[in-house]
Image (cartoon, rainbow, N blue to C red):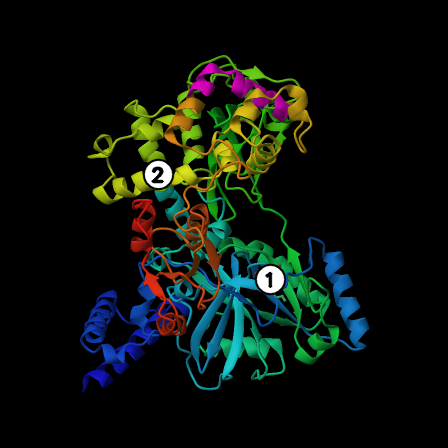
Amino acid sequence: MNPAEEIEQLRAELNQANYEYYVLSQPRLTDRAYDERMRRLQDLEILYPMYADPHSPTQRVGSDLNQAFRQEAHRYPMLSLGNTYSEAEVADFYQRVCRTLGENVELVCELKYDGTSIALHYEQGRLVKALTRGDGTVGDDVTENVKTIRSIPLVLRGSDYPERFEIRGEILLPWSVFEDLNREREARSEPLFANPRNAASGTIKLQNASLVAKRRLDAYFYYVLGEKLPATEHLSNLQKAKSWGFKVSDAVTLCHNLDEVFAFLKKWDVERASLPVATDGVVIKVNRLDQQAELGFTAKSPRWAIAYKFQAEQAATRLLSVDYQVGRTGAVTPVANLEPVLLSGTTVKRASLHNADIIEALDLHIGDRVFVEKGGEIIPKIVAVDPKSRAADGQPVGFTDRCPDCATPLLRYPGEAAHYCPNQLHCPTQVKARLEHFVQRKAMNLEGMGPETIDALHRLELLKTPADFYGLKPVQLMGMERMGEKSIRNLMQALRESKQVPFERVLFALGIRFVGETVAKRLAKAFGSMDALAAADREQLLAVDEVGERISDSVLAFFADPENRDMLERLRSAGLQMQGESTAAPVSNRLSGQSVVISGVFVHHDRDAYKALVEAHGGKVASSISAKTSFVLAGDKMGPAKLEKARSLGIEIRSEDEFLALLQSDENTTL
Ligand code: IVH
């Protein structure tokens, strides 16, 4: 066999094995045989690069390069569905549809998968593009990430597929993977995903496809679109899609009347508990495509389909004890420890109790039989108590009067439900949470400063306030876990760059209670500088849009504190932006008069950051190359047409490293 034939055969065998394993759940090849074939194919593809193919099974591991997502308009807008919790409204839907069409209709009932929707485009049987829903009109091109999902065919089976078509479905993270993932995140003190849906949508938007490949996503498909579909009925098209290698749920059922629809709802409300992935209802669709077309769409959703949502599942268990946790703002929240109970696919051991009022309203006693329910949050809530179950010696749940971390007596502000630990500057949990808040992307964006590093530096007493970040020396970080030479260099770079972060984000980063992103923007705009804000009185603060007494008191208290003032002085000396754009001078005029085109995928920063950098140094960003372009800042995968145009006009192309070096170089050198 010549190499081309061997490559072809290995690809076919591996595609078949993937299909059997991930779509049919019936593996026939052993793991070892699979690995051997995969390794052989990888070797051959390296030896014979002329046979490379982006649809080869080897391409599912995902590239390690950072990618920025290109946006693209959907060929058909991605609409949502009208939804209901009531069977009576399902009956109304059915009657309305029959009345409008003047005949009886067949309906298809499907499970409503609770993940993140995806639109795949196939041409000549090959996956060419995958778009997220985005705003319904324009989505992100996540093709590279989607290719790592093993149950999605890169090359279709059979031959009776249309030349071009689109198929929509739901990307899901199975419950078991979700739990493993959260366990790992908990061990690394990373924030947990609230539910598999958030985990799936977060994963598909990761900028590194090799990380996506590790997350073991799955996908089910429920809607085929295109000009030349094989059948005139929705169900037959789904069955065709199944034969092309897509995962289509076995639950899909044709119903001839309402009774059959209700039977489906009843059956799956119970049986969905044993499914490997999350579902939150049933989608009921008119089967015939000509009838769908006649019914048409409203601005938001099709008139030929409706979603029936299941009630949130409840479970009964026992209250064992109550713990208290303190958050960034000092709010202390009670958390119930429960006898473990299975609820919507996960074991529940803890439930949020929110605040003292809720405990009181529930008249909660230790040992009570309680009912828990899961909303969209990871921590379920206690919705009811069975008072008859109470033991004679059951102790009422009070509320702690001291901070669970630093034992400071708690305060309760008038009109507020929460208890607060007032020891904001020294309560360790609050201090660390404030540092974590400061480094986040939306604030100072100090990438690489994860919770464990903050925790370790806090324990070493190197970090207490955000100002301490700017005093960190590389030697102090050496030898710390996860702090290799490269991470240290990146962190130092992030610290330097954070000096360009605009004033409004610096203000948000301080973590002043009740000053979120929007309020920070308003305050920054109204006062223009940290000094003016610090000098503002109550009346001036209250005059700002959206600022009420709660916020103004909190701002006044923050600036009244000498320790905060001291920290602000240190941040100012470190070079952080302490005034708004209108008054701030550009960082330099290094690029003044220059027109820069940014193209390709970058490794160190994303495109927006480069745009901001060009502008901060006095340059302008243009979208297309022309004779006026001063230079092109080129990342990876810059389009060949652009490259050619730049070359033909003799325009210089700079890599991101060259560009960054340029910004740091001496002011007086000419470009
Ligand atoms: S059909 C034009 N079928 O639910 C409507 N959607 O609320 C096409 N979903 O955006 C959607 N399972 O992300 C359809 N079996 C199913 C579904 C389903 C889950 C999601 C989908 C859609 C949302 C609508």
Whether residue 562 appears in magenta in the rendering, the answer is yes
Amino acid under disc 2: Arg
Q: Is residue 206 left or right of residue 13?
A: right
Amino acid under disc 1: Gly
Question: Where does residue 339 sit, x and y in percent of width and height?
Answer: 47, 33
Q: Is residue 129 visible?
A: yes
- Distance of mark 2 from mark 1, alpha carbons? 38 Å
Question: Where does residue 403 sit, x and y in percent of width and height?
Answer: 47, 18
Q: Which residue is mark 1?
A: 136
Residue range highlighted in magenta: 550-566
Task: Determine the secondary structure under disc 2.
Answer: helix
Quadrant for the C terminus in the image: bottom left
Task: Determine the secondary structure under disc 1.
Answer: loop
Question: Where does residue 490 sit, x and y in percent of width and height?
Answer: 30, 43
Q: Say which mark, if any, is on residue 496.
A: 2
Predominant SS along the magenta part = helix
